[in-house]
């Protein structure tokens, strides 16, 4: 039962969103009721027209008199049909408009929430899943206004009032006429629920197809170089075939049920003719009344069949709504404390004090970081080196609070970073990630991403320092060149230099380079470092690298392994100590030297230590 409660709660919440547009919803409902009333008037007009024809015929009225009354009936019928059409159009228009408003509001709310949700949420949630929530689920909720709420009102008016009109005038004939309602209604609902179930299956199969295609396009070079086109083709064909079979199954369900429903409907039409015809013959009802009932039957056929669509809309809105509200109701784990002040920058000294950290789901023993302590002041550089998976990037991600420490603290100028606003903290810290993401936009826009008001001289200085300016200058459109997926393709090294320049534009007091020069050749990296030397006194710098030439100039170097600092010192002191750092240096400068070096750098199981 709690499940039902949650579902009703979800539908109620969507309905409340719709009724926030009070005027439009009231107008929609009023128009839907009026449209239904006009539609139900049509059978009565038809019945009256048939009866009056018979009356004229029986009492031998003049042609003119008969014509004028019949013309009036035809005009009324025409007017009722037009009014029904106009009010249907109006209520559809307003319901669609409310649905579109809700879609617009939800799209913004979801996008805004996704910007704020913590990284731990994004780690656990597939981005494709979030995109589905942002598109398909919003569509499910949006459509509920017209295909759920308004359809429920229209069906209630037509089936409810129509049934009442028939039963209250001729109870027996009414019951005979309505005999198809439960059968067809039940069948329509069963069919829709079956189609809905297979729709989910179809969506899953289509998303596998999309993923296969995405991977194929993304990894096209790997596919071609391994000559795996046939394998890829058969993989695609298999999944495509499964989707095709399911589509055939769906067509079967639809055709079988539609035929059954038409059959049930025509049987009750036949029953009405048989029972009604006998009643006409024994004089208990007029031919007009029988015509009226047959017309009611025709009118009721569609809404009864649409009961399935209504149930489908309710089911879809419930699932979609639950998934959307799950995102909207989630509070970001990383947030400002109430009344938190902005970070007050004096010098820009970064301190790690016995920091321990575990990712969500990790227990005490498998902590990613344990007891990490260091301090970097402006003008100083800290180097972090260690084997893959040692925890270096995790250290970088803790500084702008992508995650919160599990123990210990991180301070900037003595202020715990959890006590200040996120905006002020992230303004003070720039991290260049391992994968430099480039937006599909002009080079100048990518460079000014962090500060759109920055002047051109500053942008050029940043790209000059990152050794990118001369490359940009020789492009036909220079800084206005479009880059990204639809623009000029940049090499890995060019992307990294663009990311460095983008960070330099910001001039943050704390700069973190997370393996951000791995794709840049050593000579270019050397020139970038020389360029940075002129501003180094203003910044505390953290450099993470596998190539020791990238960080051997650092004031302090930490060798991290298994989330712990296992060696620390300057390049010279670490070499003197003759530990893992010295072994790595020997391997990088003279790889063939001797086996003892190999033994230190490689772990016991034969894996590379760095
Ligand atoms: P590399 O040199 O390869 O970049 P690293 O030293 O930077 O490695 P981290 O990326 O900090 O290592 O990862 C440290 C450990 O934490 C690894 O075991 C990794 O699998 C794990 N890890 C990293 N990110 C997450 C995450 N978002 N959720 C759970 N575990 C993670």
Image: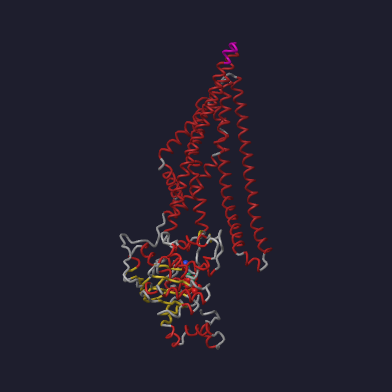
For the residue pair 100 and 458, the one nearer the viewer reads as 458
Relative image position of residue 324 (x, y in whole percent): 46, 52
- Name which residue lies at 49% across and 56% down: 130
Q: Position of residue 66 (x, y in %)?
A: 58, 14
Kindly indicate the quadrant of the structure image that contains residue 419: bottom left
* 309 w.r.t. 169: above or below: below
227 vs 102, left or right, is right
Residue 61: percent from the left, percent from the top? 58, 11
- The region drawn magenta spans 58-67
Q: Which residue is drawn at 64% across and 42% down?
A: 255
Q: Which residue is drawn at 51% across and 73% down?
A: 518
Answer yes or no: is residue 319 visible.
no
Q: Say if 223 sits above or below 135 in the image.
A: below
488 horizontally vs 326: left or right: right
| Residue 52 seen in render | yes
> Would you say residue 59 sits in the magenta stretch?
yes
| Number of numbered discs | 0
Q: Is residue 392 above or below residue 108?
A: below
């Amino acid at each position: 039962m709690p499940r039902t409660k949650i579902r009703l709660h979800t539908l109620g919440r969507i309905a409340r969103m719709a009724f926030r547009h009070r005027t439009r919803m009231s107008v929609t409902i009023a128009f839907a009721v009026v449209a239904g009333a006009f539609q139900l008037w049509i059978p009565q007009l038809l019945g009256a027209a048939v009866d009056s024809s018979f009356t004229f015929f029986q009492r031998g009225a003049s042609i003119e008199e008969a014509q004028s009354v019949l013309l009036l009936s035809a005009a009324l019928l025409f007017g009722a049909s037009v009014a029904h059409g106009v009010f249907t159009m109006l209520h559809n228009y307003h319901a669609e408009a409310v649905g579109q408003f809700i879609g617009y509001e939800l799209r913004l709310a979801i996008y805004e929430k996704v910007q704020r949700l913590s990284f731990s949420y994004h780690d656990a949630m597939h981005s494709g899943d979030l995109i589905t929530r942002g598109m398909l689920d919003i569509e499910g909720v949006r459509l509920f206004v017209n295909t759920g709420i308004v359809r429920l009102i229209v069906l209630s008016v037509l089936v409810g009032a129509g049934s009442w009109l028939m039963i209250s005038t001729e109870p027996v004939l009414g019951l005979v006429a309505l005999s198809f309602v439960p059968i067809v209604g039940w069948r329509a609902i069963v069919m829709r629920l079956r189609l809905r179930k297979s729709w989910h299956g179809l969506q899953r199969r289509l998303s596998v197809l999309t993923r296969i295609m995405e991977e194929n396009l993304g990894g096209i070079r790997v596919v071609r170089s391994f000559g795996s086109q046939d394998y890829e083709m058969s993989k695609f064909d298999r999944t495509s075939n499964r989707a095709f079979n399911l589509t055939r199954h769906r067509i079967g369900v639809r055709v079988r049920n539609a035929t059954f429903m038409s059959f049930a409907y025509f049987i009750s039409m036949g029953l009405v003719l048989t029972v009604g015809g006998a009643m006409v013959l024994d004089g208990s009802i007029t031919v007009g009344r029988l015509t009226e009932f047959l017309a009611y039957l025709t009118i009721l056929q569609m809404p009864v069949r649409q009961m399935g669509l209504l149930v489908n809309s309710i089911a879809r809105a419930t699932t979609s709504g639950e998934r959307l509200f799950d995102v909207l109701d989630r509070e970001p784990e990383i947030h400002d404390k109430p009344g938190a002040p902005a970070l007050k920058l004096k010098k820009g000294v970064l301190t790690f004090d016995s920091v321990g950290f575990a990712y969500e789901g990790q227990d005490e023993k498998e902590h990613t970081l344990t007891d990490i302590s260091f301090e970097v002041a402006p003008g100083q550089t800290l180097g972090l080196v260690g084997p893959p998976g040692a925890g270096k990037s995790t250290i970088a991600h803790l500084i702008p609070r992508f995650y919160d420490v599990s123990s210990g603290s991180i301070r900037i100028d003595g202020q715990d970073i959890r006590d200040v606003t996120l905006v002020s903290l992230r303004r003070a810290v720039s991290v260049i990630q391992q994968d430099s993401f480039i937006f599909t936009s002009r080079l100048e826009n990518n460079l000014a991403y962090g500060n759109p008001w920055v002047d051109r001289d500053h942008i050029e200085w940043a790209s000059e320092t990152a050794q990118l300016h001369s490359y940009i200058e020789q492009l036909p459109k220079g800084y206005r060149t479009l880059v990204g997926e639809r623009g000029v393709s940049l090499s890995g090294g060019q992307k990294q230099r663009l990311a460095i320049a983008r960070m330099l534009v910001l001039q943050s007091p704390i700069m973190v380079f997370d393996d951000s020069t791995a794709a840049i050749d050593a000579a270019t990296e050397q020139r970038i470092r020389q360029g940075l030397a002129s501003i180094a006194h203003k910044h505390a710098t953290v450099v993470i690298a596998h190539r020791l030439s990238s960080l051997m100039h650092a004031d302090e170097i930490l060798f991290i392994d298994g989330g712990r600092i296992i060696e620390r010192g300057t390049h010279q002191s670490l070499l003197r100590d003759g530990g893992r750092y010295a072994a790595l240096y020997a391997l990088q400068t003279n790889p063939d030297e001797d086996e003892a070096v190999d033994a230190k750098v490689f772990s016991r199981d034969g894996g590379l230590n760095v």
